[in-house]
Amino acid sequence: MSWIALDDLLGALLLGLTDARLSGPINAVAPGAVRNAEFTQALARAVGHHTFAPVPAFVLRAMFQEMADEMLLASTRVRPQRLLEAGFSFAHPELEGAMRAALAEE
């Protein structure tokens, strides 16, 4: 699962608008994609709750048919290669730190 902190998204957009080396599409994602289970655990730790048992894939397929495979179970490992090559520095490269920072702002 790809993700990005809001501060980093805004920084990447600003860099894309102002740096002539970055024309065309760029992957605005954090450098470390995570599995859904990792995302759920990081969110639970950030808000101080426990995680629940994962939902088995066959249950998702029974509920959502082909959409389960296309939207919920498919792998989407995306890297911000062009941002990294342009020297972009992520303020929140790790998921749990990004979640804690976002929750602290509220």
Image (spheres, helix red, strand yellow):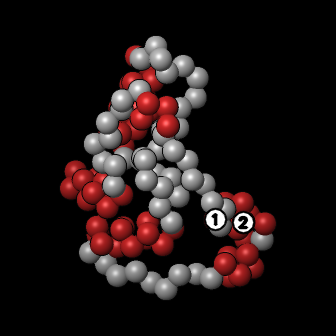
Q: Count residues near mark 1 (Cα–Cα under 10 Å), then give few for <14, some for 14-19, many for 20+.
A: some
Q: Determine whether 62 is above or below 18 in the image.
A: below
Give the residue at mark 1. 72
Dot 1 amino acid type: Leu
The residue at 51%/66% (across/down) is 35
Q: Is residue 50 left or right of residue 37?
A: left
The residue at 66%/78% (across/down) is 57
Q: Nearer the viewer, residue 88 or 96?
A: 88
Q: Count residues near mark 2 (Cα–Cα under 10 Å), then give few for <14, some for 14-19, many for 20+.
A: some
Q: Position of residue 84 (x, y in %)?
A: 42, 35
Dot 2 amino acid type: Asp
Q: Determine whether 65 is above or below 62 in the image.
A: above
Residue 69: mark = 2
| Residue 94 visible in the snapshot | yes
Q: Position of residue 15 (x, y in %)?
A: 39, 24
Q: Secondary structure at mark 1?
A: helix
Q: Residue furthest top?
A: 20
The residue at 49%/86% (across/down) is 53
